[in-house]
Amino acid sequence: MSDDTADQDRQVQAPNRLRAILGGSAGNLVEWYDWFAYAAFSIYFAKVFFPAGDQTAQFMKTAAVFAVGFLARPVGAWLMGLYADRAGRRAALTLAVALMSLGSLIIAVTPGFDRIGAAAPAILLAARILQGLSVGGEYGASATYMSEMAGKRRRGFWSSFQYVTLIMGQLVAALVLVILQNTLTAEQLSAWGWRIPFYIGAALAVIVFWIRSGLEESQSFEKARAEGTPKGTTLAMFREHPREALAIIGLTAAGSLAFYAYTTYMLKFLTNTTGFSKATAGAVNLATLVGFMLVQPLFGWLSDQWGRRRMLVFAFGAGAILAWPIFTLVARANDPVMAFLLIFAALIVQSGYTSISAVVKAELYPAHVRALGVALPYALGNAVFGGTAEYVALWFKSIGLESGFYLYLAGMMAMGAVIAFSLRDSARHSRILED
């Protein structure tokens, strides 16, 4: 009788689990679409907010604002992580997407430098800080929620959709870019067309706010609340789990640097270094993102079979070896197909990390401090290294030492491989106890 009841429970839980994964994924997609729309369209609105200087100087200024948005992410991660561990994962997810909608709307309606002067870049900066707070909270809450809802046997597979939707958000931003490039002139895009994606993002976020308000809470959080487990504090998290926090910072620093190097920065690299047109660079970027997104569940599934640690060592070790040759060959590429194959090869290797980024971090912590433990160390590593990827790369180019960035990336990936090798396999030692 108990076996029949258990089977029935699994049948009842399965659609709820799928609904939770899809609900969390939809919000994650919109969050990251809004975040990446800035990077995708900055090649058009850079001169609207920063009219002085040559193209590289304008790109550096928009990249600097992009980096400042990243610096706000640790604050958002800290606040939203505490909130998610106290009020619940669902409440944090709903608040995060509301903040992102507001930030996108502000960018969409802000006049340019020619109309309001220095107030224009100041407002742009404020909007990006608001979005940084939102995304900082989103990652930890969604990574925790989806990992807790995924189930033991397929946790790597299902939690990989956290990065599927992260990439899909970037993909949709790139797709909107390609569509607008083929329907508007370059002059129209630079004048007003770049505002369209931000209006789209604000509208989609309102829809997701409604979807997320209907999600059910995770069993891990409900159990911790029912047992009256004391909620973790920031100091307690670092004091009680220092090794886990430092490992997440290191893995995130290397993984985020590589991710932004091969995705958001690569769009500028293809135009500013390789010499492709903006339309061609956008098409190559779009194609690599599609392939990157599609392989995430495969690598997530492989981590359920082979373990998380092996996947991480592969991703960072091979990533360190390939960084220099990939960037060097892309810089010399004359054929867009060859550029695509090179970038996609790097992203396939990177998938060994990205597909399990969420679950590896969530499995390291107990439920009462899990959202904070995932969010804050991740945001710290991401802000310092991921958020500055474009700026550092452009700085190396500006001083005539562009290949210095390739060595920098390779060194960080090597560090990530050492950290991954030192960890226990989280799939076999997971602290997410509920199925």
Image: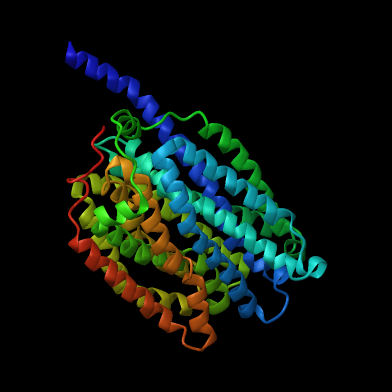
Which residue sits at x=69%, y=53%? 106
Which quarter of the picture shows residue 216?
Answer: top left
Closer to us: 22 or 345: 22
Relative placement, left or right, of 49 versus 359 is right
For the residue pair 270 and 213, the one nearer the viewer reads as: 213
Q: Position of 102 compared to 134: left or right? A: right
Q: Please say if 250 is above or below 366.
A: below
Q: How is the image coloured?
A: rainbow
Can residue 127 be seen here? The reply is yes
Count of residue discs: 0
Q: Residue furthest top?
A: 1
Image coordinates for residue 401, horizontal then vertical, percent = 46, 87
Horizontal placement of 292 versus 335: left or right? left
Residue 134: image x %, image y %?
53, 50
Which image quarter holds the N terminus? top left
Where is 241 relative to 422, above or below? above
Q: Name which residue lies at 55% across and 66% down.
A: 68
Report the residue at 74% width, 66% height from top. 119
Q: Nearer the viewer, residue 406 or 275?
A: 406
| 286 vs 100: above or below | below
Name the residue at 51% across, 81% down.
Answer: 395
Say whether residue 259 is visible: no
Residue 305: quarter of image: top left
Examine the rendered structure and indicate whether residue 41 appears above or below residue 322. Answer: above
Viewport quadrant of the C terminus: top left
Residue closest to the eye, 368 or 29: 368
Pinpoint residue 232: horizontal percent, then vertical percent: 33, 45
Residue at far bottom of view: 400
Of all residues, the one furthest to the right in this rendering is 115
**x, y percentage for residue 70?**
50, 62
